Image: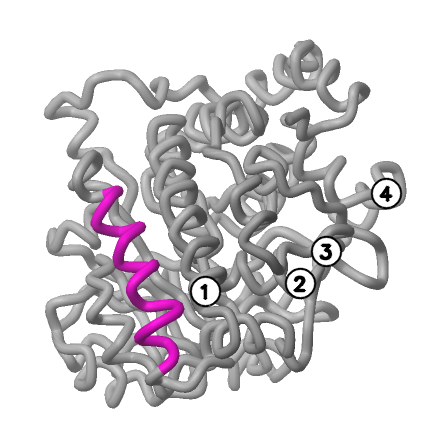
């Protein structure tokens, strides 16, 4: 199935040489993602990779979920010219440009690909669109076993080559100055959109399927898990050094139902990826995960991303010190004064450090629209100089 429209496909194939040449002039060309790692390149690895490996580092690496996007004026200006989300995320040059906007402005230690968790769905024979004011729309929701049988195996390179090309360019652009992150949606969260036909507040359709037709839901989740694992591998092979799994809506399941409809499929993804890419760090994030932390640990990711509903010390004690921890400052703090932001960033770092874990400084959720850019800049500045302030 063709994922991008003809205009976008032509643009991607053409690679917009002038735009890329201009970017290459801005900074020295870094080593390609496929270049063998030598002793000298290992010493210059991104801070995030060294911290996750357990090397002694002077401070925790820092990035921010949704760091590219709506709160930045450069992104708002770009949206006036390129009006649809899919154009911005499925056009290589635009996706790279947006991904790099926060890196050029704030120099985070992680640069995450600008994309969407639904991006690979057309490659599974599940068309979708994203409309302004409504969000994702799947015109033909999947609610029967016959429809599940029509879900195909994902060929990521064939369906979304712009993802791989964007990741390769990002690796070249940032070099060893930051880690490049990819991301995917977890099977259950993807299924909520597929079954509901888009976003939902009640999740009535997928819960009806879970309790009235569980075999149908399990069949869908099983296919999604296989495809998500392949998509993670594709991103890693294209240059993603870390991949985050978002199970955004899993907290709408009771813990006992998480054990049936979400947890096993997250674990299937992780186990499958680790069989082929054992050294790829995988982050697991669930919004509103306070009741699910131990279950997140059972899926055995490398990094557990804790949201702001959980005290970070309590969270670490609940999952154990064997995992790296990401998080977990409330994004609302970024509306506060610089003193408030500094105090909260340092408190989060200090409390994680007190537990002796590898830590990635991040928010407990994505940065909120309307957040002042100068406050985001201060967040990064404080985190980058935390070792001098504590």
Q: Which mark is residue 373?
A: 2
Query: Mark 2: few, some, or many residues within 10 Å (few <14, many ≥20)?
Result: some
Between marks 1 and 4 in the image, the one whose residue lies nearer the viewer: 1
Q: Mostly what secondary structure, the magenta segment? A: helix
Does 339 appear above or below 132?
below
Report the residue at 52% width, 23% height from top: 165
Give the extent of the magenta segment. 257-273
Judging by the rendered image, the residue that carries numbered circle 3 is 136
Q: Position of residue 124 (x, y in %)?
A: 55, 37
Q: Position of residue 278 (x, y in %)?
A: 16, 41
Residue 14 within the magenta-colored segment of the rendering? no
Disc 3 to disc 2, C-alpha distance: 27 Å
| Quarter of the rendering occupied by the C terminus | bottom left
Residue 317 placement: quadrant:
bottom left
Judge by depth and name the residue closer to the eye, 18 or 140: 140
Which structural element holds mark 4? loop
Q: Position of residue 229 (x, y in %)?
A: 35, 43
Q: Which mark is residue 83?
A: 4
Does 181 appear above or below 11?
below
Does 62 appear above or below 10?
below
């Amino acid at each position: 199935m063709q994922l991008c429209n003809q205009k976008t496909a032509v643009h991607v194939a053409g690679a917009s040489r002038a735009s890329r040449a201009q970017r290459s002039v801005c900074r020295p060309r870094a080593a390609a993602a496929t270049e063998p790692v030598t002793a000298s390149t290992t010493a210059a690895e991104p801070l995030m990779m060294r911290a996750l490996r357990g090397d002694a580092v002077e401070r925790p690496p820092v990035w921010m979920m949704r760091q590219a996007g709506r709160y930045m004026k450069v992104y708002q200006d770009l949206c006036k010219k390129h009006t649809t989300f899919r154009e911005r995320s499925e056009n290589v040059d635009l996706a790279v440009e947006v991904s790099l906007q926060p890196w050029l402005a704030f120099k985070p230690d992680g640069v995450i690909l600008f994309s969407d968790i639904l991006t690979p769905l057309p490659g599974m024979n599940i068309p979708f669109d994203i409309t302004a004011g409504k969000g994702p729309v799947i015109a033909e929701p999947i609610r029967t076993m016959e429809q599940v049988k029509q879900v195909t195996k994902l060929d990521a390179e064939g369906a979304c080559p712009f993802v791989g090309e964007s990741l390769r360019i990002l690796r070249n652009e940032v070099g060893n100055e930051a880690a490049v992150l990819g991301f995917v949606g977890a099977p259950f969260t993807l299924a909520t959109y597929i079954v509901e036909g888009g976003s939902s507040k009640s999740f009535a359709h997928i819960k009806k399927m879970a309790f009235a037709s569980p075999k149908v839901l399990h069949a869908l989740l099983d296919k999604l898990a296989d495809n998500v694992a392949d998509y993670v591998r594709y991103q890693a092979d294209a240059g993603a050094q870390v991949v985050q799994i978002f199970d955004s809506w899993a907290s709408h399941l009771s813990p006992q139902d998480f054990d049936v409809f979400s947890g096993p499929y997250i674990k299937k993804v992780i186990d499958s990826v680790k069989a082929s890419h054992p050294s790829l760090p995988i982050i697991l994030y669930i919004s509103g995960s306070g009741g699910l932390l131990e279950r997140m640990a059972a899926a055995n990711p490398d990094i557990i991303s804790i949201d702001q509903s959980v005290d970070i010390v309590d969270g670490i004690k609940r999952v154990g010190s064997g995992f790296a921890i990401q998080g977990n400052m409330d994004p609302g703090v970024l509306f506060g004064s610089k003193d408030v932001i500094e105090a909260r960033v340092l408190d989060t770092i200090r409390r994680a450090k007190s537990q002796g874990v590898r830590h990635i400084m991040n928010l407990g959720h994505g940065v909120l629209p309307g957040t002042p850019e100068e406050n985001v800049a201060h967040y990064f500045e404080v985190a980058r100089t935390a070792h001098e302030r504590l």
